Image (cartoon, grey):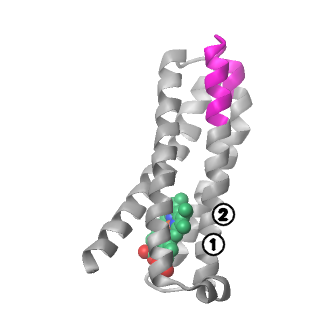
Amino acid sequence: MELIHAVMWSLHVGFAVLWTGSVLFVTVAVLPPATRGEIGADALASLVGRLRWITRIAAVAFLVTGGHMAGTLYTVETLTGTGRGHLVLTMLALWFLATGLVEAAGGKLVSGLDAGKLREPARDAKPLFYGAAALSVGLIVTAGLLANPFGF
Ligand code: HEM
């Protein structure tokens, strides 16, 4: 059925944009003022809480929609034996690592905020957010290689 493929693809790409955009936005626009103590602890906790929820909902969405696309477009042979298959496996690995880093960064930040601190947990979480942001850029490149009309 055509419609199910269109729905799965749209959800996949929609969450790809929302999630990578959120990780990059928090890293470049929220974290620097947080390390300088320029954002209130409540506002920061709420922003990071939203990022963690987006990350978790997106994880379910990626597994369902990506699993559907991989199952309909690929076999084990084409996944492991073609350039496009390798890009899909790269996408899966980058997503897994970036999700782990966002979870670790968010957890570190929120437990520091719960303990009444602000700048120190923001500084501690910074390398983890930078790592997640770098992996997100890697995901965008991987998706661009798969999606660009000139092919791969
Ligand atoms: C569980 C993790 C994921 C799995 C299993 C997965 C799997 C897939 C598969 C099988 C495709 C179709 C490839 C093709 O057209 O040949 C695809 C496309 C795509 N994925 Fe993922 N993906 C995952 C996570 C992500 C993430 C985190 C992003 C964020 C950037 C992303 C962005 C995209 C985009 C933009 C496309 C469209 C490419 C196109 O139209 O050709 N995916 N993914």
Quarter of the N terminus within the rendering: bottom left
The residues tagged by marks 2 and 1 sit, at their Cα atoms, a distance apart of 6 Å
Asked if the stretch drawn in magenta spans residue 111, the answer is: yes
> Helix, strand or loop at disc 1?
helix
Residue at image mark 1: 89
Estimate the x, y position of residue 90 in percent, counting from the top left: 65, 70
Q: Is residue 124 left or right of residue 54?
A: right
The amino acid beneath tag 1 is Leu
Q: Is residue 17 left or right of residue 97?
A: left
The response on whether ligand 1 sits within 8 Å of label 2 is: no
Q: Is residue 15 above or below residue 86?
A: above
Q: Is residue 22 left or right of residue 31?
A: left
Comparing 25 with 70, the one in front is 70
Estimate the x, y position of residue 133 in percent, counting from the top left: 62, 49
Q: Residue at x 48, y 60 (%)?
A: 62
Label 1: few (<14), some (14–19) or many (≥20) C-alpha neighbours in 10 Å: some
Residue at image mark 2: 93
Quarter of the rendering containing residue 149? bottom left
Label 2: few (<14), some (14–19) or many (≥20) C-alpha neighbours in 10 Å: some
Q: Residue at x 70, y 41 (%)?
A: 128
Can residue 145 be seen by looking at this rendering?
yes
Comparing 139 with 50, the one in front is 50
The amino acid beneath tag 2 is Ala
Q: Are marks 2 and 1 in contact (CB under 8 Å)?
A: yes
Quarter of the C terminus within the rendering: bottom right
Can residue 40 be seen by looking at this rendering?
no
Asked if the stretch drawn in magenta spans residue 7, the answer is: no
Q: Which residues are magenta?
A: 105-122
Residue projecting furthest to the top: 116
